[in-house]
Each structure stands twice: as C-alpha cells, then as structure tokens.
Amino acid sequence: LNLEFADISGQDLKVKRENYVGQVWKIDDPEKLEHAKEVYKLFNETDRDTATPLARQYGFASVYEAREVINHAENLPDTWDVPMVTLSVGDWGAVFAPYEMFGTQGTYIKDNSVFSVTTIMGYANPHVGYIPDVRAYEYGCYESQTAKFVSGTGEILADKYLEMLKAIQ
C-alpha cells in the first residue's frame, strides 16, 4: 500500500469559528399535540407495532414523529445554537459540522469550496441532531420528523460554511 500525503510543513493553520442561531420548528396545534400524546402513551404501554396504526390514523408517519411533536411543543426553546468551525492548511479546507449533514449539502460545499480539497466532518461536538435538506422536509422522512430546525436551515448552513472557508483561504 503506497499512500502519498501532501507536504504541509511550514504552512499556516487557519481556523474560523462562528455560531449560527437557528430557528427551531415549534408545534402550536393543541389537537396535534393531544394526538401525539395518545400515540406515545400507547407506545409506552405496549410497543411500536401496536402504536403505529394509531399514529397513522392521526396523520403521523411514525411513533417517533409523535414523540418529536411532544418534544417540539413542550421541551425545545425557540432557537438553538449551532457552533460552526472551519479549518484550513494550505489548499486543504475542512468543515466541522455538529450535526448529520445530508449528502446534498456536503456535495454542494465541496463543489463550491475555494479549496482544491475540502473535507466534511459531521457529528462534531456538541451534536445537534439532523439538519436535513429542504427535499427531506417535503418528503417527510425520519430525519426531517426528528430534526430540531425549520426547513431550509441545512441550506443556510451550507452557504455559511462556504463563506467561512473563503474567509480562511
């Protein structure tokens, strides 16, 4: 196995940190919240297979969506901080995202980065969960049902990471 690494000796390490304050999606529908509590109570008393038909009857894609409705209605603040970090050495740039970034966002960053090599690292501490792309919210997948942030946040963050990379070029 022959691995070649770029010589970065003597090159400056540059780091940029920012904090994005993201809008959390909130539930303000009392009927939806009541239904979510019914579904989740049944789930806690029995199992997912028993609770799923009730969840679907109430318009939830899953028991987990019902749980997140409760969480978003009762436990989450209106905004949540997303600590953002970028780093560069020579012509290599890196993004440290404290969430699970969708492939469309990562590809967008890599395709538009000012660096010839850009690495995306997700799940950086502190982890803030999923931040899906807009299409995932439209589709209604698990990640969008359990995400803390409103639709469009992933695209905003991708653009902010590109600005941060440009600033440390």
Image: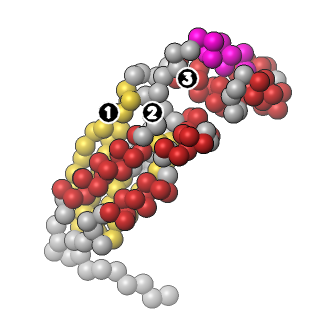
Q: CA distance from mark 3 to mark 2?
A: 14 Å
Q: Which residues are magenta?
A: 30-39
Sequence-first disc among 2 and 1: 1
View extreme (bottom): residue: 2
In what quadrant of the picture does the C terminus appear? Answer: bottom left
Q: Amino acid at mark 2?
A: Val
Disc 1 marks which residue? Answer: 21
Q: CA distance from mark 1 to mark 3?
A: 19 Å
Q: Which mark is residue 150?
A: 2
| Res 128 quadrant in image | top left
Answer above or below: position of 78 versus 129: above
Sequence-first disc among 1 and 3: 1
| Res 106 quadrant in image | bottom left
Q: Secondary structure at mark 1?
A: strand
| Image location (x, y in percent) of residue 145 | 58, 35
| Image location (x, y in percent) of residue 92 | 28, 69
| Front residue of 123 and 52 | 52
Residue at (61% x, 16% y) in the render? 33
Residue at (30% x, 63% y) in the render? 113
Answer above or below: position of 73 versus 125: above
Q: Residues within 10 Å of mark 2 (few under 14, many from 20)?
A: some
Q: Main secondary structure of the magenta part?
A: helix
Residue 36 located within the stretch drawn in magenta:
yes
